[in-house]
Image (tube, helix red, strand yellow):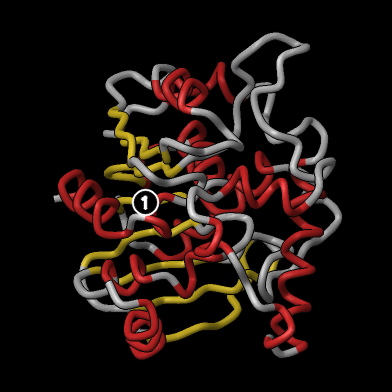
């Protein structure tokens, strides 16, 4: 996949982007491409929005891409405090959109949100793809399951996230001020929702038995934020869930190895 060509294709396939009021909250919703609906829940850095994999998926799907409260142009009222809260908002959104059962792909933080939704009502999903998600506590109280990205140097965070550090570099000096403001707002909202307890919902693990739709975990072999062992243990909490590993990839296997990622995902969705 050629990055610049894919980015232009992605932009060309944007059919609409607007604000929708759901449960008293204005959410930014992007709809991209044509075909069967596919819910896309992007990660905390929103890197997926310009990724080649979304351009590829939009060739035969209508992608429904909401921005969580506090991300993009979505509102963040004070009463929304946790990913658990966002799960209910997103379920209301799916009801409002009236698209029936749809497959969903959740990346990192977005994968966590997908499971918050599915444990409450998995009837809105036909299948789930979860890419290196956070969300549960695997070890004991003193075990660090997930790296605390707020308390280590950003350069160290980048090394933990990426197998190929060059692919993770972003030139912030070349970005317009509006885009930088959105990045800062996304980071602030992510910290607000996930700081305490750190990167998990203590109740989620005990709810995962409620997820009964086909579920596929995809993990980067070199993810230094949430390890392979964490991912395997997570997947075992959902009956029948599949688990695949992509080599030479960190926390974002869909960005580092997009062709292998698409091969796996298309095989599962089709």
Q: Is residue 150 left or right of residue 45?
A: right
**Which of the 4 quarters of the picture holds residue 19?**
bottom right
Q: Is residue 77 left or right of residue 84?
A: right
Q: Which residue is mark 1?
A: 104
Against 105, residue 57 (above or below) is below
- Asked whether 33 or 126 is in front, the reply is 33
Against 193, residue 256 (above or below) is below
Q: Is residue 193 left or right of residue 100?
A: right
- The percent coordinates of residue 231 (x first, y second) are 46, 27
Q: Residue furthest top?
A: 140
The kind of secondary structure element at disc 1 is: strand
Against 34, residue 141 (above or below) is above
- Asked whether 226 or 194 is in front, the reply is 226
- The percent coordinates of residue 3 (x first, y second) are 37, 77
Which residue sits at x=73%, y=53%?
A: 155
Which residue sits at x=48%, y=76%?
A: 30
Which residue sits at x=46%, y=27%?
A: 228
Report the quarter where the N terminus lies: bottom left
Q: Is residue 262 left or right of residue 220?
A: left
Which residue sits at x=30%, y=33%?
A: 244
- The percent coordinates of residue 111 (x first, y second) are 49, 44
- Asked whether 186 or 65 is in front, the reply is 186
Rate crowding at label 1 as few (under 14), some (14 to 19) or many (20 or more) other CA atoms within 10 Å: many
């Amino acid at each position: 996949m050629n990055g610049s060509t894919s980015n232009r294709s992605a932009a060309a396939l944007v059919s609409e982007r607007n604000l929708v009021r759901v449960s008293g909250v204005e959410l930014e919703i992007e709809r991209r491409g044509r075909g069967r609906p596919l819910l896309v829940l992007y990660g905390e850095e929103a890197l997926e929005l310009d990724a080649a994999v979304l351009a590829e998926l939009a060739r035969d799907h209508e992608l429904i891409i909401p921005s969580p409260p506090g991300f993009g142009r979505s509102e963040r009222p004070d009463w929304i405090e946790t990913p658990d809260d966002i799960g209910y908002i997103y379920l209301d959104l799916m009801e409002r959109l009236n698209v029936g059962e749809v497959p969903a792909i959740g990346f990192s933080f977005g994968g966590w949100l997908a499971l918050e939704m599915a444990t409450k009502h998995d009837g809105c999903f036909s299948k789930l793809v979860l890419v290196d998600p956070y969300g549960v506590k695997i070890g004991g109280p003193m075990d660090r399951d997930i790296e605390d990205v707020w308390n280590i140097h950003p350069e160290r965070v980048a090394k933990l996230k990426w197998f190929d550090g060059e692919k993770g570099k972003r030139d912030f000096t070349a970005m317009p001020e509006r885009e930088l403001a959105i990045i800062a707002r996304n980071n602030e909202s992510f910290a607000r929702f996930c700081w305490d307890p750190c990167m998990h919902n203590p109740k989620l693990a005990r709810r995962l038995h409620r997820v009964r739709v086909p579920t596929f975990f995809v993990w980067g072999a070199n993810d230094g934020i949430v390890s392979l062992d964490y991912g395997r243990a997570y997947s075992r909490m959902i009956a029948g869930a599949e688990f695949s590993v992509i080599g030479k990839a960190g926390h974002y296997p869909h960005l580092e190895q997009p062709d292998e990622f698409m091969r796996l995902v298309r095989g599962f969705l089709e």
